[in-house]
Image (cartoon, grey):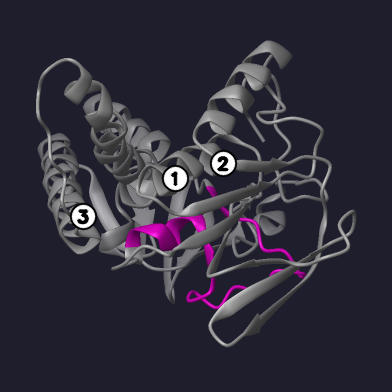
Amino acid sequence: MKNYDVVVIGAGPAGYEAALELAKGGFKTLLVDKNKEKIGGTCLNEGCVPAKNYLQSAEFISKSSYFKECGLDVDIKSFDLGRLREKTLLLKNELHSGVFWLLEQAGVELLYGNASFVDANTIDISGEKITFKRAIIATGSKPKNLAELPLDNKNIIPSSGVFELTSLPSSIAIIGGGAIACEFATFFSSFGAKVTLIVRGSQLLSKEDEDISKTLLRAFKKQNITVLTSAVVQEAEVKNGEVELFIKEIKEPIRCKMVLCASGRTPFTDELNHQKAGVESDERGYIKVSKSYVA
């Protein structure tokens, strides 16, 4: 049975950076994730990096009319989402290579599989038992599933599903009013899709200042993005390639070609069996820690 000073579970920015620093400090370190493609975490694979690359293309489109006003004749005849997807994949692969190189240079060992605690000093990685002195849980989060919006990865998709699309829908309803929802509202609207944002709360970006929310709302109105606040989805039905969304506060259903569920994220801790290691979590799955983040 292999033994390590530290096992780091989760190879996102928090996990792999922690593993790098530990290995540089002389600790025998194992970094664990589900598979090789997950290295880099949500940020690199289906979050910040691909999203910002998509938004940059949207920004160029939105500024084309301004360029023309300034005397620069920019004629955008078409948009190929497949090519943007390929370009984004190349970017991700390049960054993946950089992360692997850093881990190799630091002497961090990698193991792929599902991690599950056996006790406070033992972990099972897809059938292989590993012992350790310390463990770092850096498993991150995953899109929150809503019972009233069953994902089919075709008509109703999670935020990560945007990067799998090969064509743009003519209309889309986005569930959520946070940063992810607002970013994708901007993206789809820039390329001509009819966008409806359905927000459960009373304002966009509920964690930000009200002034910021109001400014963003004005900008969305200029882009013809419809924003419905204090709106709760009760049911979704897929009919003839369209989705009908039934909103509690609205009599007529909202019809669109696609629904993007961006209503938040939930901790990725349900498979860890961390209770066996004496680690507690709350009812939402968040691990309880001290002020110094020790469980």
Task: Say which quarter of the image contains residue 110.
Answer: bottom left
User: Which residue is the site of mark 2?
Assistant: 225
Q: Which residues fall within the magenta stretch?
A: 141-163
- Hey, which residue is sitting farthest bottom in the picture? 240
- Is 185 inside the magenta-drawn segment? no
Q: Is residue 7 visible?
A: no
Instruction: Count residues near mark 3 (Cα–Cα under 10 Å), then give few for <14, some for 14-19, many for 20+.
Output: few
User: Which residue is the site of mark 3?
Assistant: 79
The residues bearing labels 1 and 2 have C-alpha atoms spaced at a distance of: 7 Å
Sooner in the amino-acid sequence: mark 1 or mark 2: 1
Q: Nearer the viewer, residue 250 or 212?
A: 250
Q: Are marks 1 and 2 in contact (CB under 8 Å)?
A: yes
Q: Quadrant of the C terminus?
A: top right
Residue at image x 20%, y 49%? 92
Image: 232 above or below 8: below
Q: Secondary structure at mark 3?
A: loop
Horizontal arrangement in the rendering, residue 55 relative to residue 89 (left or right) = right
Horizontal arrangement in the rendering, residue 225 relative to residue 191 (left or right) = right
Q: Residue 76's spot in the image, x, y percent?
A: 16, 44
Q: Secondary structure at mark 1?
A: helix
Residue at image x 42%, y 49%? 188
Name the amino acid type tagged 1: Ser
Residue at image x 19%, y 59%? 80
Image: 86 above or below 199: below
Image: 28 above or below 59: below
User: Which residue is the site of mark 1?
Assistant: 189
Task: Say which quarter of the image contains residue 172.
Answer: bottom right
Instruction: Count residues near mark 2 (Cα–Cα under 10 Å), then give few for <14, some for 14-19, many for 20+.
Output: many
